[in-house]
Amino acid sequence: MRFYASYRLAQRLTLTMVLLFAMGPPFCAAGEESTSDCRIIPSDGFNLEIIDRISPERLIVRSTSTVHNWFAGTFTDLSVRGETTIGLSMEGNDTRGNPANVSKWVGLRPVMTYADPTNIASYRWYRKETDGRWVVDDPLVPDDARYAGTGETPQQDIIPADLAAQFLSDDGRYWCPWRDIVSAEAVTNLNVFRVRQHFTRPTATIAMRIPYTYTYLQAYLQQLTATRVPGVSVDVIGTTPGGRTLQAIRLEDPTGSVDADDHQTIVVFAREHATEHAGSWVVQGMLAHLLRGDADSLRLRRNNTWLLIPIQDPDGSAQATFDNLTDLYHGDPRSPDLAPEALAYARYFADYCYGGRTIDVVVSLHNVEANECENICCPHADVRNTSLVYEFNRRLFESLGARGYRTGSYDKPWDVSFMTFRLYGWCAYQFDALDFAFEVNDRYPDRRLSLPLLQGIGRVMAAQLAQWCDSPEGQAWHQRARKTLKLKQLERAAYFQQAGYGPEGRTPYDLIIRGF
């Protein structure tokens, strides 16, 4: 035990010396007190801890979880005297098949806010209309509360008024309570990341990218439920081992005039990898667009059901762990390693389909760290349907490119295979859904995306998905999915008759392997 404690102390001292070297010369004068009262306020999904306070303006932090594509922490009792330097080492944060390498962070600008990250209002942004009025871009905010004055910045109580101008976009058209930290550097030879910032308030949050937490999602869903938007409901899929709720936001055609034969379903989820927050904001942008109730959003919902899952892994999100839910939809479903979330999602989608509805398209959203790809790229294409995937990618990427986004190659994915062991591939295998995967990257050094622009990807993607479903290719695919489902319904009925029990007695094998 003594040996282990000594070893851990030596590790910590070594890390401190490495970070001190990376952080440059000291800021404290000779004889100055070299301590700091700065501390971190625990928060859902945040994962930084202070391991050394060299001076009030020099802090060394590390991740509390083994992850290297995410960091966030709310610091309080910060020094406001001058520039504070925060050093973060990536050593020891390797994940399976993916080493922690700060070279992927070259060009990374993290984000910061003085707002309370647990407050839903801290994730609202405002746009300036042509008449000079500021309006909050949240369709759930009542009409009489949407407008926020005509000043240089909107009237709000999220950021102190004297600091609000710091969070204004360069063109003055958008305001968001999160902004980039300009002075940040990846010290590649030491595998260290360094941030410098003059904080003007003693409490501030810094993060790799704008957080999308389980706490935020629950607050938003509570607001959504209370608003009673026609045709919108929240489905409870199950409960995680940590006691959190698995949820899908279901948006039906609000006209109620859906033809059962023509009805299509679009499934979009993010956070299969729980620390990839950017994908959740794309889903949120898609949701906000579909909720607007204008002619365009109603057109996208016509004859369509949208099933949106902003956080696929709530426990992983809350604990800042990278990967709990991949590679679970094959092999022996009786394995004790099978997460109950996998069974819950399989049961939800099976019940949905055997209720008579197809899943026509399923999309899985991820994000890279910083400089590995453009604002959007295609990491994987289904080997069985590459021509359809590439054609959809081409249309989507061209539409995004016309709006100033940087895109990767539409027909050169990182991998061409069949992902039956992941949820989106399982839906494709079991129910003949056309499956897509995308990496989004708001921190791409050549085109960093603000929260409005990140959510804008969701609006464009929603339009392209609905357009594809309405196209001749989409209609033909829908008829194919309907035939597949009818055959599976017959197969399922015969299976349970022979097994001597019904769907209520389904085993993990019945769900995961047979899709019943």
Image: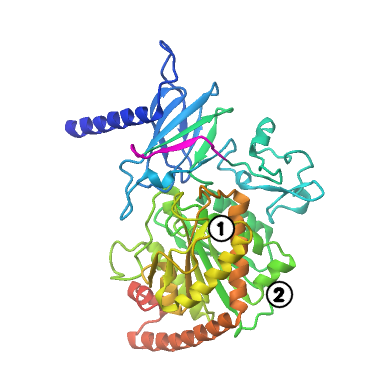
The reply to whether residue 200 is visible in this rendering is yes
Residue closest to the eye, 15 or 124: 15
Q: In the rendered image, which residue does mark 1 sit on?
A: 282
Badge 1 density bin: few <14, some 14–19, many ≥20, Cα 10 Å: many
- On screen, residue 321 above or below 478: above
Quarter that holds the N terminus: top left
**Left or right: 270, with 256 as reference point:** left
Residue 354: image x %, image y %?
49, 80
* Numbered range of the magenta stretch: 180-191
**Left or right: 140, with 515 as reference point:** right
Residue 259: image x %, image y %?
64, 83
Does the magenta segment cover residue 189?
yes
Residue 141: image x %, image y %?
70, 52
Q: In the rendered image, which residue does mark 2 sit on?
A: 255
Residue type (three-letter) at the residue carrying disc 1: Val
Residue 45: image x %, image y %?
46, 46
The reply to whether residue 243 is visible in this rendering is no
In the picture as drawn, the residue positioned furthest to the top comes out as: 31
The earlier-in-sequence mark between 1 and 2 is 2
Q: Quadrant of residue 506?
A: bottom left
State the separation of the CA atoms marked 1 and 2. 26 Å
Task: Determine contact: label 1, label 2, CB under 8 Å.
Answer: no
Q: Secondary structure at mark 2?
A: loop
Quarter that holds the C terminus: bottom left
Q: Quadrant of residue 412?
A: bottom left
Residue closest to the eye, 51 or 174: 174
Q: Residue at x 63, y 71 (%)?
A: 252
Residue type (three-letter) at the residue carrying disc 2: Thr
Does the magenta segment cover residue 28?
no
Q: Secondary structure at mark 1?
A: helix
